[in-house]
Amino acid sequence: MSYFRSLCGLYLMCSSDHVTFSNSETNRMTMSVTTAVSGIVLIVLSISVAHSWREWEVTFTTTEICAIKGSTVVMHCTYTYPPRINSINTTVQNSFWFIYVPNVEPVDLRIDSKYAGRVWYHCGTNDCTLRITDLRESDSAVYRLKLITNQPGGTYTGSPGVSLSVTGVKVQTIHTTQCLTYWCNKLEMQCHSSCLPHHSSYIWYKNGHMTSTESLYSGYLYSGDSISCAIKPHETFPSPSVCGYYQYCNRVNYTERRICAFKGSSVNISCTYYHTDPVVSKFWFRPDRSYWLGTHFLLWDPSKDSQHADRFQLLEREKGRSTLRISDLRKTDSAEYRFKFTTQSFQWGNISPGTTLTVTDPDIQVQVVWSSTGPQLICQSSCFPSGHSSFVWYKNEEEILGESSSLYTKYADGPDSYSCAYEGHRSNPVYAPKVPSVMRTAPGDIIKGSLVSLTCSSEANPLPKYSWYRKAQILVSKEKQLFFQSIQPSDSGEYYCTAENVLGRRISEFIFINVKYGPNTSVVLMTPSGMIVEGDSVNLTCSSDANPAAKHTWYKGNQTLLASPVSIYHFTAISSEDSGNYSCKSENQYGQITSNSRFIDVKCTRKAAVTGTITAVFLAITLVMVFLCIRKYKWFTQQSKDGEKPSSEEQVNMDPVYDTPSAVAEGEPSGHQDDLHYSTIHFSQNQADALYSNIGPGQLYGHKDEEASEAEYTAVKCDNSSRAQGTRCQGNGGDTFTLYSTVKRS
């Protein structure tokens, strides 16, 4: 990044003539300027030179200026600075011009009472201009610019600055020769100023009459004659008149060459005059209203004009001093005023410049400037009348006693308002910003993609600077208006703005941006997401992105199931009949969208089959137990009838129980009977009703045929614990009974 220094040169604004100069830096650029009678203004242009954007630098358009006393000078500079330091964006918070004095803290020129009403700033983003009017020789100094930024310790002073030299014009005598007669000198003179440009044009005045335009004056001056000179285009600032012979002569010296006054006010225009003979007449006149009548030049004397006599007064308060007082000033009174007097043998000319009056509308204002101790208030105007009239200060509309300077000396508190007055003309008050208000364009709902702007407004003087923030102090703009060209849902959130001037800072209330939009997605989600079997609890969720939240309609195929603001469709116990394609429609007032179909396949096995198997096994075991207990009970009953008691260790044989009772019923021979398997159930004395099976080959009871079928039998033992627990078994602790079941072999 680079910056540019302007083309360097200068031109002077003068009364009615054109002036042309060239300068080596401007590539011999020629400039011609015509100005009004207000005086000289020195303007500086600049030359472009690239520099690094990383540098702190102030570039002055010229480093040396020489100006004529009473004229106006304009100084200009540009500056650059690093845009970002330590992750902080750099901003220039203030800038001001000051007079450089080694080891002295810089002071804003506007605070210096010597410059009251004569200093004016105009500072942009990267440049600043200083204008000083009614230059005085005491204004000669080095002027620099100071930058104040938001960076820690971020102040920078431009150097070397601008060296201003203010000087007047004077007549210098080169050679004097006394005339052959008395009361006369022959003189050679030059018009001198240290600020004279090369090839200047001159004007010489003798007794108020223009007499020569040569660079040097050579002529005879008699007793009473005076001479002065001016340099074009500085005619309004001529040298003081000097006597050509001896020290007494006729001459006029004006107190001020330029006066600015407010419309409706009063002004005094004064001069001192010297005469060698008694004065016959004297008056003030306006050259622009005088005219030639035949061979005579008629001067307009306002004091003798019936239309103006009540506003124009000629005052003679002391000898040799004349004052023209003009009351109830009007803009038409703006003009040059000259003084003329005559004696019996002498008449002062009407050509030499007088005093220029400018009448403007009142523009009193309080300017707030930065200082190291806080904001300072200055009563200013582009046109302060001459004199030493006092100022009046007001705080919250009440007059502040003891404050009569153009600079308010007390501390300015932001919540209060301040104003000043000068000769009855009062400024508008200055105050810190009020709480900002926020206005939004296009009231109503904010629709996605629409144009939305937020405007921050606050009452303040000076005018405030605005900034926009999103919640959590995220800076989004440094403008009065915040624009969303095509607002998006991501822009939703809370925003606020700040208004700030040199007297304070205020924060607005939060404004919530809620971007509305129709559904742009719609998806059917299923929970659980795996295989679904009959009896499962299943949720279908219609997932959509919309603001406000969408309402949902559920479909199975082409059949409408449910319309509800709730996004979930619930199956408490899903069945195979619920299998099919499901979809949902999401809609709000801004649009609608239908999801793709999702197929649900409900399986009819797994859990039901397992549950049936477990139940069947449990029932089978239960039936076997019941059956065994019944058989046991019958056996003990039979033994009780027979009076027999088996020993604790002997096996008890019981009638076989056949799995194939049809074989026995038909009287099938024993040799051809199916093999029999017996089960033994034993109830242990030491264990609680243990039930177990011993399965092995055995002989069928009552058959001794070797070819008899093998049998599996079951032995049941009962112990005391079993009896204690209510088991219906007979015999001593280890009683055993045998149940036979016949299993037919294939």
Image (cartoon, grey):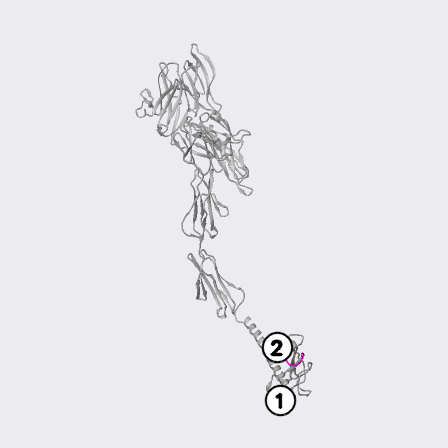
Going from N to C along the chain, the mark reached first, 1 or 2, is 1
The residue wearing badge 1 is 668
Question: Toward which corner of the image does residue 279 lie, by quadrant?
Answer: top left
As for residue 674 lying within the magenta part, the answer is no
Left or right: residue 741 versus residue 452 is right
Q: Position of residue 661 (x, y in %)?
A: 60, 85
Q: Which residue is labeled 2 in the image?
A: 726
Predominant secondary structure, magenta span: loop
In the image shown, does 703 or 653 lie closer to the viewer? Answer: 653
Secondary element at tag 2: loop
| 362 displayed left or right of 49 | left
Q: Tell me the residue at 48%/70% (across/down).
A: 577
Under circle 1, the secondary element is loop
The amino acid type, in three-letter code, at marker 1 is: Glu
Is residue 300 visible in this depiction of the protein? no
Residue 738 pos. (x, y %): 65, 82
| Residue 730 counted in the magenta span | yes
Q: Which quarter of the rendering shows the C terminus?
A: bottom right
The magenta segment is 722-733
Can the viewer see residue 320 in this picture?
yes
Place of residue 490 in the rendered image (x, y in percent of width and height, measured from the top left): 48, 52
Q: Residue furthest top?
A: 181
